[in-house]
Amino acid sequence: MSTRPRISARISAISESATLAVDAKAKAMKAAGRPVIGFGAGEPDFPTPGYIVEAAVQAAREPRFHKYTPAGGLPELKQAIAAKTRRDSGYAVEASQVLVTNGGKQAVYEAFATLLDPGDEVLVVAPYWTTYPEAIKLAGGVQVDVVTDETTGYLATVEQLEAARTERTKVLLFVSPSNPTGAVYSREQTVAIGRWAAEHGLWVVTDEIYEHLVYGGAEFTSIATAVPELGDRVVILNGVAKTYAMTGWRVGWLIGPSDVVKAATNLQSHATSNVSNVAQMAALAAVTGDLSAVAEMRTAFDRRRQTIVRMLNEIPGVLCPEPKGAFYAYPSVKELIGKELRGRRPQSSGELAELILEEAEVAVVPGEAFGTPGYFRLSYALGDDDLVEGVSRLGKLLAEAR
Ligand SMILES: Cc1ncc(COP(=O)(O)O)c(C=O)c1O
């Protein structure tokens, strides 16, 4: 019998997606009849707008879409993504610089696989979205955390980034608005960080998937546009999931210099080939249409954002800075760790989240999933009534902590 491990070391090292795990557990409890309220899912609770669905139905009827199409994306969609990028962030790109991917997630994997050699370091601001570390690791890269906290609204400074830079640093990952914190960098902060990266010859991989979800006075700034000095060392990741409530359709994209896009397209041509043509045609309707659907969602999210922040901050031991974008609140619960609650003494935010799911039937994702224990992530992309009920239950339970 072979003693070799059944699963490769590379793949064994990948952890389960904690956000999907929390969501699955909450859904299973719900299916078993328990009235669970889930703050775990990172997806809008709205259906995809009708005109987008209609475009997909029509595409499904067209025999040309029943066949393979170019691995890098339908030419008309690549063209439309280039035009949309010029429209929304003022960044000039050609269709040849666009690769259409199976969701933003595949764009994340392909960007790091294309840029990183073993040992290359990537600066990642923590708290970070759970997928980045796995994509970096799989590519052989080394993640270097730049840890932020609630006292600065989870924003990193040039000084912090510079302290983490070494001669092995190749990439800065820049995410604004951020998942999980909702932090949004101002134009000035973005320019300062971009110029610092350019000065040191770093690549910037920037995830712009929440570009249209900013609130109050906050503004989205594309680092690619704001810092032309970055030249051909910028890779933009984006997709239709969050803007058009299209998480299940699986269409994202990567924009970059032509050598990077060509190499990433080669990878995709062997891994997955073209994204489903039906989904691509739906995405074409989305990106060529107007932004009224996202404007409506933004109004609802903004209302829920204000409610959740207010209610969370009313709970003793919970401290929630105001998120300026995306649809997540990221409160600190550090004061509650180690306190007695319903006969138990949770020693981590992970244990506290488990206790909350069991005792209050409320699902939140613990900060361990995002590289910073001591916090919770709550998505406010759920109905207003559920949101109020869920945070009320949380407040009632946590008020018992001694
Ligand atoms: C920051 C960020 N980037 C990318 C994605 C990927 O989205 P999708 O693969 O659904 O397009 C997500 C989804 O949660 C995200 O939060």
Image: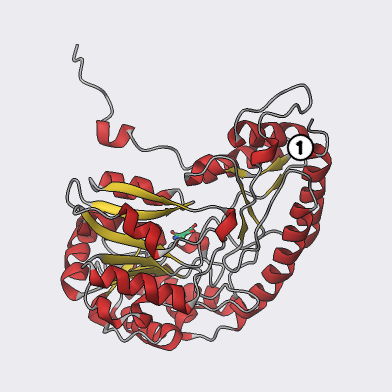
The residue nearer to you, when weighing 24 against 185, is 185
Q: Position of residue 286 (x, y in %)?
A: 49, 78
Q: Is residue 176 above or below residue 166?
A: below
Q: Pointer 1: what residue? A: 34
Residue at point 27% right, 45% down? 138
Query: Relative to 394, is 188 on the left or the right?
Result: left
Q: Position of residue 216 (x, y in %)?
A: 65, 77
The residue nearer to you, when weighing 330 against 238, is 330
Q: Is mark 1 within 8 Å of ligand 1?
A: no
Q: Position of residue 67 (x, y in %)?
A: 29, 67
Q: How many marks?
A: 1
Q: Is residue 233 above or below residue 115?
A: below
Q: Position of residue 59 (x, y in %)?
A: 43, 75
- Tell me the quarter of the picture where residue 292 sits: bottom right
Q: How is the image coloured?
A: secondary structure
Query: Relative to 164, is 233 on the left or the right?
Result: left
Residue at point 80% right, 45% down? 395
Residue at point 34% right, 72% down? 194
Q: Looking at the figure, which quarter contains the N terminus?
A: top left
Q: Please say whether residue 113 is visible from this viewpoint.
A: yes
Residue at point 26% right, 69% down? 72
Query: Relative to 11, is 207 on the left or the right?
Result: right
Q: Please say whether residue 31 is visible from this viewpoint.
A: no
Q: Amino acid at mark 1?
A: Arg
Q: Which type of secondary structure does the marked residue at label 1 adopt?
A: loop
The residue nearer to you, when weighing 150 against 183, is 150
**Residue density around tag 1, few if under 14, some if 14–19, many if 20 or more, within 10 Å:** few
- Tell me the quarter of the picture where residue 399 sits: top right
Q: Is residue 103 above or below residue 140?
A: below
